[in-house]
Image: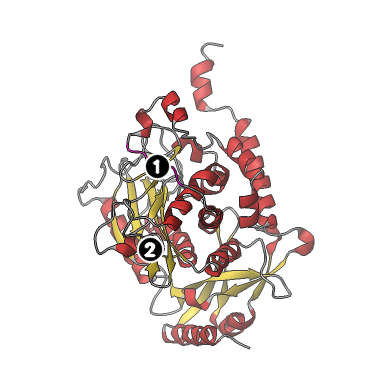
């Protein structure tokens, strides 16, 4: 039996495509590393593809399939249909839809990151929860992709003169809003030429799709202006890197399950166990939330990036921050996990964050007391006495922790778990073999 809501969504897509003279529809999906993949169909194929999907060869997609089992089907999610604002609008318009990847027999493909997130969201739903997230993605504008020449020398919340960066950010926000993505605000970040656009929080699956769209739109608008937008975690030595702080909350119906009016921190037992789950499992999920060798150049003390396993109400040095409660804003109660970076795969990142938090709730983990002092200013002995651990220092260490993690294996599923680790091992081995500019400058004159 055809799902009534899906049928209505299909009819809406067909009607909208006709009204806007859509000629091409791009079918979007994501590989295990979080790279957006796409192929286009003509509008004449749309009705059939909405019902049955479109076949493609998955053998060349990172982490998807071996040559002998390469046939895949991309089934569009009609609820993700939107016109692409940077393409022609009046005639031969172009639209996009995100796809779920299926096997030829119609079963979900376990290597599809979107399916991985759906599985974890079902676990939350079976416990009575809806998972909401609000990520803050930072990024840089550079003159081009060949170097790191900055566009401005502005700082945090600076109102830079009406230069290119102001126009870029404005056009990016307007384009995202045309694609149905709510924006709360945008501003200049701490580092020169670094910016942030914050999307309004929503359910995790919609937000993962939105993150993929956000990154593409930021790059497309920059390209239209003749410059380059980069989500590389640490592109410039000596200044802040780019993070993706992820605000998270669990709701039961209309009620925020994290809020408790009678607690001194206004946090429920579930919220504290969720925080405890994230603190306990943070090291083993770090290769997912920070998946590139470059990610660990950002995760060093002194650049607003958290490396210590602690939580706090106000401090921004801690891994987890719980924003202050404002009376009447119970629904805004949330916790902010600060280590992920914007070059991660959002489907996998939201999956492991949720899995760690739910594990804390299911197992009844107890959260430590929040940290009042600045963790960066503590000595190593003081942190050890307070039992404050650290995140892994490099991708190699992070992979070793993930390999042993039953939580990550369960959250990602065997296929993605094995493919991801295999890919990251290769990246780490290749990186270790490099001779860097730093080594040449430091050692060549001496040795």
Q: Which residue is mark 2?
A: 201
Left-right relation of 261 to 135: left
Q: How did the renderer colour the structure?
A: secondary structure
Residue 130, percent across and down?
Answer: 47, 67
Q: Residue at x 42, y 82 (%)?
A: 20
User: Closest to the observer: 295 or 446?
Assistant: 295
Q: Is residue 28 above or below residue 45?
A: above
Alpha carbon separation for disc pair 1 and 2 = 27 Å
Magenta region: which residues?
A: 367-372
Q: Main secondary structure of the magenta part?
A: loop
Q: Which residue is mark 1?
A: 369
Residue 294's disc is none
Q: Residue at x 31, y 65 (%)?
A: 174
Residue 291 appears anywhere in the view: no
Q: Is residue 236 above or below residue 33?
A: above
User: Closest to the observer: 145 or 315?
Assistant: 315
Residue 285, percent across and down?
Answer: 56, 47
Q: Is residue 52 above or below residue 217?
A: below
Q: Given this view, does label 1 or label 2 mark the residue nearer the observer?
A: 1
Left-right relation of 392 to 272: right
Q: Does the magenta portion include 369?
A: yes
């Amino acid at each position: 039996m055809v799902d009534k809501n899906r049928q209505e969504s299909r009819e809406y897509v067909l009607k909208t495509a006709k009204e806007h003279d859509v000629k091409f529809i791009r079918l979007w999906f994501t590989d295990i590393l979080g790279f957006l993949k796409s192929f286009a169909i003509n509008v004449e194929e749309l009705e059939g593809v909405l019902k049955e999907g479109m076949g493609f060869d998955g053998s060349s997609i990172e982490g998807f399939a071996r040559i002998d089992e390469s046939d895949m089907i991309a089934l569009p999610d009609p609820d993700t249909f939107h016109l692409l604002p940077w393409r022609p609008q009046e005639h031969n318009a172009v639209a996009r839809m995100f796809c779920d990847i299926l096997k030829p027999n119609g079963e979900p493909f376990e290597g599809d990151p979107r399916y991985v997130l759906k599985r974890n969201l079902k676990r939350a739903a079976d416990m009575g929860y809806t998972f909401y997230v609000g990520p803050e993605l930072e990024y840089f504008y550079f003159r081009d992709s060949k170097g790191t020449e900055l566009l401005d020398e502005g700082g945090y919340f600076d109102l830079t003169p009406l230069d290119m960066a102001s126009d870029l950010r404005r056009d990016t926000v307007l384009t995202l809003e045309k694609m149905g993505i709510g924006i709360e605000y945008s501003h200049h970040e701490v580092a020169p030429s670094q910016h942030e656009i914050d999307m309004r929080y929503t359910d995790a699956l919609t937000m993962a799709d939105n993150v993929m769209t956000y990154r593409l739109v930021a790059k497309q608008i920059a390209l239209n202006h003749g410059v380059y937008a980069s989500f590389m975690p640490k592109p410039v030595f000596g200044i802040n890197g780019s993070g993706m702080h992820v605000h998270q909350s669990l709701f039961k119906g209309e009620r925020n399950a994290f809020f408790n009016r009678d607690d001194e921190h206004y946090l429920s037992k579930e919220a504290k166990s969720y925080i405890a789950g994230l603190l306990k499992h943070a090291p083993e999920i770090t290769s997912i939330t920070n998946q590139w060798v470059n990610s660990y150049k950002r995760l060093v003390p002194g650049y607003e990036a958290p490396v210590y396993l602690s939580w706090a109400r106000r401090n921004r040095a801690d891994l987890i921050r719980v924003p202050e409660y404002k009376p009447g804003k119970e629904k805004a109660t949330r916790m902010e996990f600060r280590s992920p970076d914007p070059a991660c795969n959002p489907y996998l990142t939201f999956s492991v964050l949720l899995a760690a938090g739910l594990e804390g709730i299911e197992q009844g983990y107890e959260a430590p007391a929040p940290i009042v002092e600045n963790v960066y200013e503590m000595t190593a002995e003081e942190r050890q006495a307070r039992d404050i651990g650290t995140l892994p220092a490099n991708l190699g260490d992070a992979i070793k922790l993930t390999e042993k993690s039953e939580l990550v294996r369960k959250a990602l599923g065997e296929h993605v778990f094995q493919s991801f680790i295999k890919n990251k091992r290769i990246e780490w081995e290749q990186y270790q073999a490099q001779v860097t500019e730093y080594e040449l400058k430091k050692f060549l004159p001496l040795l």
